[in-house]
Image (cartoon, grey):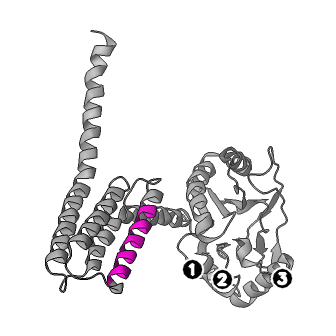
Amino acid sequence: MSVRATTAPVAWRRRLSALRAQQRRSGPEARALVLLTALALALTCLIVLLPTVVPLNSLLVPLLVGSLVLGPRVLPWFVVLVMTVLVVAVLLRHGPITTLTEVSIGVEFLLGLLVLLMSFRRSRLGVAGFLGESMFVDLRDRILNQGGMPQLPEGWHAETSLASAGGTLFAGDFVVANRPSPERLEVVVVDVSGKGEQAGTRALLLSGSFGGLLSALPPAGFLPAANDYLLRQDWEEGFATAVHLSLRLDTGAFEIRTAGHPPAVRRTAGDGRWKVLASEGPVLGLIEHAEFVVATGTLRPGDAIMLYTDGMVEEPRRDIDLGIDRLLGEAEQLLRGDFHGAAQKLVAALGSKDDDRAMVVVTRGRD
């Protein structure tokens, strides 16, 4: 038997399965279209027969419902249908065309135009309004889940806090953390160019990609690989800053690398003071073959490391070094050796509410 003969049934089964899946997806939309069409026609009849009871703007109901439940392929045609029956209702409707009638007609045509424009934008995504919103909510939740800290061994504590510009749900700052091995914790804090929802879509893409790189590469290879990945995207505004912590949970030894990002800071239990960990590197996505200088040290019992984005320390008309000094002073005042809730306290107390903010605090408990 030939290979073609044996593979043909498999191909047909796959094609049949795809068609059935498409039918299942289109079934609810087709039923919604039939119901909305019937509602539009019924309202048209009532507008013609009972003009004093059923107003012209009642056709806004199927139009608005259709904008929520119909997909981008069907929605434009439904809008045309509603506008057509509106014209028919005006022509067959008894009584004079008053100023109020003209206003109602204008409002419905304007709304129909807005729905059409919205459907053209949705066509890039290919889903209806409710489904598209649920997809973005799911993606946002995935970003937040990736920023959650993995379970750490006894004696270690880590927490994160994120806040977006203006309180929106999508932000350009995000955190990715994982334990590629029992003795290693890898954390990266990223600030994507732009703010709030403008940077949210790029953050959605980068969070998944950076999560894969973080778990697959040695510590020294992550930022170069992330830089190469961003260069390949060829975005008009495709740069990002990042700070990467690689921590040995068995010994407390750590490595810090930054890419155009505010420096990490460390608290030593001996004097209780926070100090800057100097490390250097260019912004991700701008320079090929970038090199990143590493800062090393050891977290001893009672020590802590803080990673953050520039929204925590940068404000208009204020030098970033002054912002870092304020952050260190606030950390000494707010925390005083108690690091539970530290990230949330600092995000609430510092930074600009018009900028995205992210904070990570990793501490080693006392023996």
**Which residue is label 1 attached to?**
167
Can the viewer see residue 258 in this picture? Answer: yes
**Which residue is label 3 attached to?**
317
Residue drawn at the location 37% of the way across and 62% of the way down: 131
130 sits left or right of 336 in the view: left
Labels 1 and 3 touching (C-beta < 8 A) = no
Q: Secondary structure at mark 1?
A: helix
**Which residue is label 2 attached to?**
353
- The stretch of residues the image draws in magenta is 101-118
Residue 262: within the magenta?
no
Labels 1 and 2 touching (C-beta < 8 A) = yes
- 54 or 63: which is nearer to us? 54
Image location of residue 207, percent across then percent down: 58, 57
- 301 or 52: which is nearer to us? 52
* Spatial CA span between label 1 and label 3: 23 Å
Image location of residue 25, percent across then percent down: 27, 51
* Spatial CA span between label 1 and label 2: 8 Å
Question: Between disc 1 and disc 3, whose residue precedes?
Answer: 1
Can the viewer see residue 303 in this picture? Answer: no
Kind of residue sitting beneath label 1: Gly
Vertically, is 148 above or below 224? below
Q: Which mark is residue 80?
A: none
Question: Between disc 1 and disc 2, whose residue precedes?
Answer: 1
- Which residue occupies the extreme top position in the image? 1
Kind of residue sitting beneath label 2: Lys
Question: Between disc 3 and disc 2, whose residue precedes?
Answer: 3
Mark 3 crowdedness (10 Å alpha carbons): few <14, some 14-19, many ≥20: few
Vertically, is 216 above or below 11? below
Residue drawn at the location 71% of the way across and 71% of the way down: 309
Q: Secondary structure at mark 2?
A: loop
